[in-house]
């Protein structure tokens, strides 16, 4: 069965865990953040979250809000997971694919902060206040910036991930057994009168 499953959601909600599980089920993994990391490396910047947010926003300013998804399209094989979708225009690009479904992943702020501390990525916030502040940066009103909440609202399916891994796996198996119908072409979030 062809399926391109997009993942969106706040930092440390479990998107990476879902992607890893699905890789074990034969899906090919892609991350829009990888596109940003590649660009950061080309510009000589370390892959810290703060730099990545800035570079992603610069790419959207320079090439349009759907640029990260555009750059990943040719890498897709038909049974894929696309992680780190953070802008409605990225969803619009991916909805051109006939078998694209967007899953929103969520967990409480404190749970996500503790997960973030445990994984200890370079540049991740060290305090709960810093974590909250970083989330504000990911929810801009600028159409060329990260708009996590607006993107999450486009989800075809929501995955609550505040429990044990076994519960998450059960939820994923149900999603794979009975995926929601793809929405098909999306309304362009920059020009709502235009259909992608």
Image (tube, helix red, strand yellow):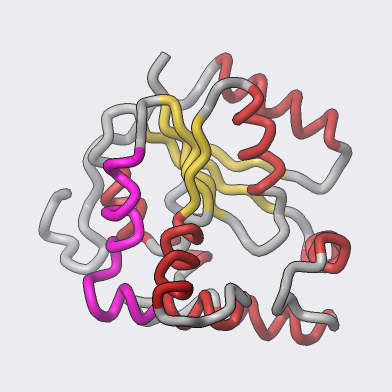
Q: Which residue is depicted at the point 33% across and 54% down? A: 69
Which residue lies at the image location 76% right of the left edge and 34% below the top edge?
A: 168
Relative image position of residue 34 (x, y in whole percent): 49, 58
Q: Give the image location of residue 111, x and y in percent.
A: 85, 60
The main secondary structure of the magenta stretch is: helix
Q: Position of residue 67 (x, y in %)?
A: 28, 63
Instruction: Find out whether residue 67 is within the magenta segment.
Output: yes
**x 68%, y 85%: residue:** 133
* Displayed quadrant of residue 114: bottom right
Q: Quadrant of residue 42?
A: bottom left
Of residue 14 and residue 148, the one placed in the foreground of this image is 14
In which image quadrant can residue 96 be found?
A: top left
Q: Residue furthest left?
A: 194
Does 134 sit left or right of 182 as displayed?
Answer: right
Question: As rendered, which of 16 and 99 lies closer to the eye?
Answer: 16
Q: Is residue 141 above or below residue 178?
A: below
Span shown in magenta: 57-75
Tell me the quadrant of the picture where the N terminus can be found.
top left
Any part of residue 56 in sight: no
Q: Is residue 50 above or below residue 118?
A: below
Q: Is residue 84 left or right of residue 196?
A: right
Give the percent coordinates (x, y) of residue 5: 47, 35
Is residue 29 something one can see in this rendering?
yes
- Relative to 79, is 131 on the left or the right? right
Task: Check if residue 92 falls in the magenta segment.
Answer: no
């Amino acid at each position: 069965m062809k399926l391109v499953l997009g993942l969106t959601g706040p930092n440390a909600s479990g998107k990476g865990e879902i992607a890893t599980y699905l890789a074990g089920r034969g899906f090919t993994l892609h991350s829009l953040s990888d596109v940003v990391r590649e660009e950061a490396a080309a510009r000589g910047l370390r892959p810290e979250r703060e730099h990545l947010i800035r570079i992603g926003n610069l790419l959207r300013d320079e090439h349009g809000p759907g640029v990260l998804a555009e750059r990943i399209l040719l890498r897709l094989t038909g049974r894929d997971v696309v992680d780190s979708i953070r802008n409605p225009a990225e969803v619009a690009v991916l909805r051109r694919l006939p078998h694209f479904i967007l899953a929103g992943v969520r967990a409480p702020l404190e749970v996500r902060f503790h997960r973030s501390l445990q994984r200890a990525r370079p540049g991740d916030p060290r305090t709960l206040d810093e974590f909250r502040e970083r989330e504000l940066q990911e929810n801009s009103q600028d159409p060329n910036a990260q708009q996590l909440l607006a993107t999450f609202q486009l989800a075809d399916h929501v995955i609550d991930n505040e429990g044990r891994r076994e519960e998450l796996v059960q939820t994923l198996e149900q999603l794979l057994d009975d995926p929601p119908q793809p929405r098909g072409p999306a309304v362009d979030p920059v020009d709502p009168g235009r259909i992608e």
